[in-house]
Image (tube, rainbow, N blue to C red):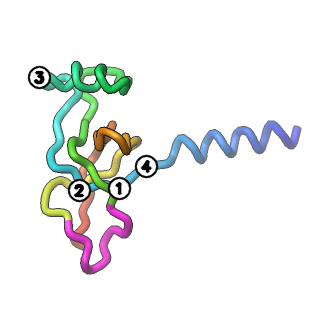
């Protein structure tokens, strides 16, 4: 019984993890050339309207003076550290 509770909590924690990132640009998975790019990198995305971040780097502290993201500040479900592509990225405000 105790193991079942721990497993449920671990799964919930994993599902909620997101990454704040500064991306050079954002697009959707259905945009010209993006589906092929994702496929060539082995990144699986379900659907043509999933927001994608390109050229993403992590934002470590949001809202602190000195944080500079002049392009597209977003929060992503996943950022591939090799290709710098963010999956399911939504805009955030870093000017707090």
SS class, disc 4: loop
Q: Kindly identify the residue that appears in the image at 25 percent across and 66 percent down.
A: 94
Horizontal and vertical percent for residue 89?
A: 29, 43
Residue annotated with mark 4? 18
Count of numbered circles in the view? 4
Q: Which residues are magenta?
A: 59-68
- Looking at the image, tell me whether mark 4 or mark 3 is earlier in sequence order: 4
For disc 4, the neighbor class at 10 Å (few under 14, some 14 to 19, many from 20) is some
Q: Are marks 4 and 3 in contact (CB under 8 Å)?
A: no
Q: Quadrant of the N terminus?
A: top right
As drawn, the label of residue 20 is 1
As drawn, the label of residue 73 is 2
Residue 66 in the magenta stretch? The answer is: yes
In this rendering, the answer to whether 47 lies above or below 21 is above
For disc 2, the neighbor class at 10 Å (few under 14, some 14 to 19, many from 20) is many
Furthest-front residue in this view: 82
For disc 3, the neighbor class at 10 Å (few under 14, some 14 to 19, many from 20) is few
Residue annotated with mark 3? 32
- Looking at the image, tell me whether mark 1 or mark 2 is earlier in sequence order: 1
Q: CA distance from mark 3 to mark 2?
A: 22 Å
Q: Kindly identify the residue that appears in the image at 26 percent across and 49 percent down.
A: 56
Horizontal and vertical percent for residue 45?
A: 35, 25
Q: CA distance from mark 3 to mark 1?
A: 25 Å
Q: Kindly identify the residue that appears in the image at 14 percent across and 56 percent down.
A: 71
Residue 62 in the magenta stretch? The answer is: yes
- Looking at the image, tell me whether mark 2 or mark 4 is earlier in sequence order: 4
Q: Are marks 1 and 2 in contact (CB under 8 Å)?
A: yes
Q: CA distance from mark 4 to mark 1?
A: 7 Å
């Amino acid at each position: 019984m105790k193991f079942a509770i721990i497993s449920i909590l671990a799964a919930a924690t994993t599902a909620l993890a997101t990454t704040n990132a500064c991306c050079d640009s954002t697009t959707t998975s259905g945009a010209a050339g993006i589906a092929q790019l994702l496929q060539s990198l082995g990144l699986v995305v379900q659907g043509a309207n999933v927001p994608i971040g390109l050229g993403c780097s992590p934002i470590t502290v949001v809202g602190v003076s000195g944080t500079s993201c002049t392009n597209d500040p977003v929060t992503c479900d996943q950022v591939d550290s090799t290709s710098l592509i963010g999956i399911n990225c939504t805009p955030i405000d870093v000017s707090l």
